[in-house]
Amino acid sequence: MKFSKEFKEAVLHLSESEKDKLLIRLLKKDENLVNRLYFELIDDQTVDDHRLKMESRVEVRAEEITRFAKSLNHLKMLTRYLSGEISEHVRITKDKFGEVSLNLLMLNTLIKNSKKLFKKSTQIQARKFSLYVIVRTYRTLLLIDKMHEDLHMEFEDDLHELGNFIANEPKLNYFALENGLDASWLISNEIPEDIAQYHKDLKAQGFLK
């Protein structure tokens, strides 16, 4: 939402007591903003502390939902909630590093524990979950691409693991290749330098849907 210059000036000229009342009223309607302000102003834990907690949470929850899921479609639905928790962590802490590392941890844990679900699923049933993994993998690669090169090596082991999981799951690997994702990139840590344009061109051609 854009505000006019006149509106901004009018708000700035409110009395301190009026501003305080408005702020409290607005905070009551925005839980995300409250959590973010709490983290920035009061919380004595660092971003790293919160990331470590989320790592444990993600690993445990990813294992739990793969055991609980009745099918890959069910697993995809359950994964959205876990993905949402990661997104909330990033919104509150602005943890760009964790946005990558936590998503890689989630994907690796899900695939590692979903072999039985893949075995009993048809190609059609496997497609939706596979596309979720593929789209999430591309998104993670794009995030890494935007980071300083010195940080790229921090994700090499997790990417290598993800590449092996994809390559060793026939249905997932089939759909990955169909959508232009070569698991060998991740295994050998040779991500295309033009990954952003490559991804853009894939979407323009109708892939990743």
Image: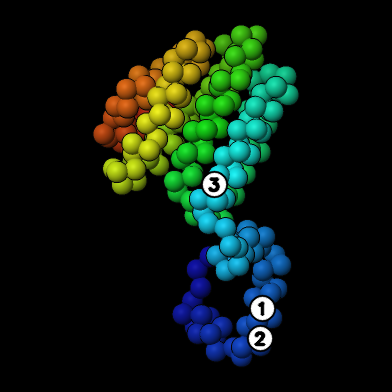
Element assignment for label 1:
helix
The residue sitting at 58% across, 62% down in the picture is 44
The residue sitting at 51% across, 80% down in the picture is 8
Q: What is the number of the mark on residue 18?
A: 2
Where residue 155 appears, x then y in whole percent?
A: 40, 35
**Residue under circle 3?**
51
Circles 1 and 2: CB distance less than 8 Å? yes
Please indicate whether residue 34 sits to the left or right of residue 51 in the image.
Answer: right
Give the mark nearer the N terminus: 3 vs 1. Answer: 1
Distance between the Cα atoms at labels 3 and 1? 33 Å
Where residue 6 appears, x then y in whole percent?
A: 49, 83
Q: Is residue 125 visible?
A: no
Where residue 1 appears, x then y in whole percent?
A: 53, 65
The residue type indicated by label 2 comes to Glu
The residue type indicated by label 1 comes to Leu
Distance between the Cα atoms at labels 2 and 3? 37 Å
Element assignment for label 2:
helix
Q: Residues within 10 Å of mark 3 (few under 14, many from 20)?
A: many
Q: What is the number of the mark on residue 22?
A: 1
Give the mark nearer the N terminus: 2 vs 3. Answer: 2
Of residues 131 and 117, the one nearer the viewer is: 117
The residue sitting at 60% across, 63% down in the picture is 43
